[in-house]
Amino acid sequence: MSQLEIGERSPPLVVRAPLYCFVRSPLLGHLVVSRALRAEKTFDALREVIPAPETELDYRDPWQLLVAVILSAQCTDARVNLVTPSLFERFPDASSTAAVESEDVFPLIRSISYPNNKAKHLVGAARRLLQVYDGVVPRTVNELVTLPGVGRKTAQVVASVAYDVPTLAVDTHVFRVANRIGLVKRDATTPEKVERQLKRLLPEDTWGDAHHLLILHGRYTCTARSPSCESCVVAPVCLYAEERQRLPVPVSGLNPAKGTYWCKTRRHYFNEPDLPTDRHGSEQISCPKCGSMNVFISKTGHSAKRVRDFRV
Ligand code: SF4
C-alpha cells in the first residue's frame, strides 16, 4: 500500500473484483459473495496448498489418538508429539494405562498443560473403556463424551479421524478462520453456532476435510496475532482481508515525538485516545478532541482503526 504525505487526499477506494464476485451492495459499497460460493472458493484454494488435510498428532491406533487429543487441549500438537513416544512406550494401550495410578502417568506428561488433570483423565478414560466398552474406543460422539476428559470437541475429532464419522469440531482455529473469511454469519458468536452453520453450508462428506483445512490454515497462515493476508490464497474471497484493504491508506511523515497518534480530521497529535466501541462490539481509537476515528499511529503511519476480529 502506498503512503500519503500529510495533507494529501486519499485516492478513491479500489475494490478488488475477483472474477467470481457478482453483486455490488448498494448499501455497503463492496462486492457481495454468497457464503456458498465463498465456501467453494475457499476450500478449492485451501486444497491446492494443503494437499493432505489431516491431524498432525502422532498415533498408531484409536486409543493412542484419544490420548493425544486429550493431551492436546490447550496445548500444541508439536508439544504433544514430543511426549507421546515415551508415554506410549511405557503405556501403549488402555489396559496398561488402566492398571496404574495417575501419579505414574504424571511424570511422563508433566511438560504438557494441566498435567495433573490430564493424567487423571487418561487413567479414568482407560478404566471406563475396559469396564464399559471392552477396551475398544467407541465410535459415536455420544459414547465418547462419557469418557473422563473427553468433551464434545475431543469426541468429534476422535470419531472423525479414527472412524471417518462425519463430524466438524470447532476449535479456536476453526472458529477464527471461519468467521474471518465469512463462511458463517455475523451472529455466529459461539463455537456451537459456527459448527451448526458450517454443517448446514458444507456437504457432510467434506466435514472432516474442512475441519483439518481450517485448522491447518489457522495454524500456519491465518494466525491469531498476525494473519498473512498478503500471501493467503483465500484473500480474494475473505471478508477480513477485504475490510483490511478498505482501511485508510497509511500516512508518511508523522513525528512520533509529538504524540502517539495523529488525528487527520483535526490535524493534531495526541497520546490519550478515547476508546469507543463500534457497532460490531470492537473497541476503536478515536480523537479525544473531535471524536473522529480518522486516526493514525505516528510511529508506523498506519490507520489506528481496528478490523473486527474473532479470537477466542
Ligand atoms: S486473507 Fe487473511 S484473514 Fe483471510 S483467511 Fe487469509 S490470512 Fe486469514
Image (spheres, helix red, strand yellow):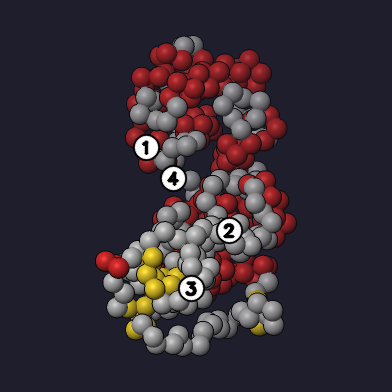
Q: Amino acid at mark 2?
A: Thr
Q: Which numbered tag is attached to residue 294? A: 3
Q: CA distance from mark 2 to mark 3?
A: 15 Å
- Which residue in the protein does label 1 denote? 79
- Dot in front, 3 or 4: 3
148 and 9: which is toward the camera = 9
Which of the two discs, 1 and 3, labels the residue nearer the N terminus?
Answer: 1
- Give the secondary structure at mark 1: helix
Measure the alpha-carbon separation of dots 3 and 4.
44 Å
* Kind of residue sitting beneath label 3: Asn
Q: Position of residue 45 (x, y in %)?
A: 51, 68
Q: Position of residue 129 (x, y in %)?
A: 60, 21
Percent across and percent down for residue 270 are: 38, 65
Cα distance in 3D space between marks 1 and 4: 11 Å
> Residue 244, which numbered label?
none
Measure the C-alpha gap from mark 1 to mark 3: 43 Å
Which quarter of the image is occupied by the N terminus? bottom left
Mark 2 and mark 1 lie on one chain; the one further toward the N terminus is 1
**For disc 1, does the CB lie below 8 Å from ligand 1?**
no
Circle 2 is placed at which residue position?
A: 277
Judge from the rendering whether residue 199 lies leftward or rightward of residue 220; answer left or right: right
User: Which residue corresponds to mark 4?
Assistant: 56
- The earlier-in-sequence mark between 2 and 3 is 2
Compared to residue 256, the image places residue 5 above or below, namely below
Q: Residues within 10 Å of mark 2 (few under 14, many from 20)?
A: few
For the residues labelled 2 and 1, the Cα–Cα distance comes to 38 Å
Packing grade of label 3 (10 A; few <14, some 14-19, many >=20) is: some
231 shown above or below 17: above
Going 49% across and 60% down the picture, which residue do you hit?
A: 274
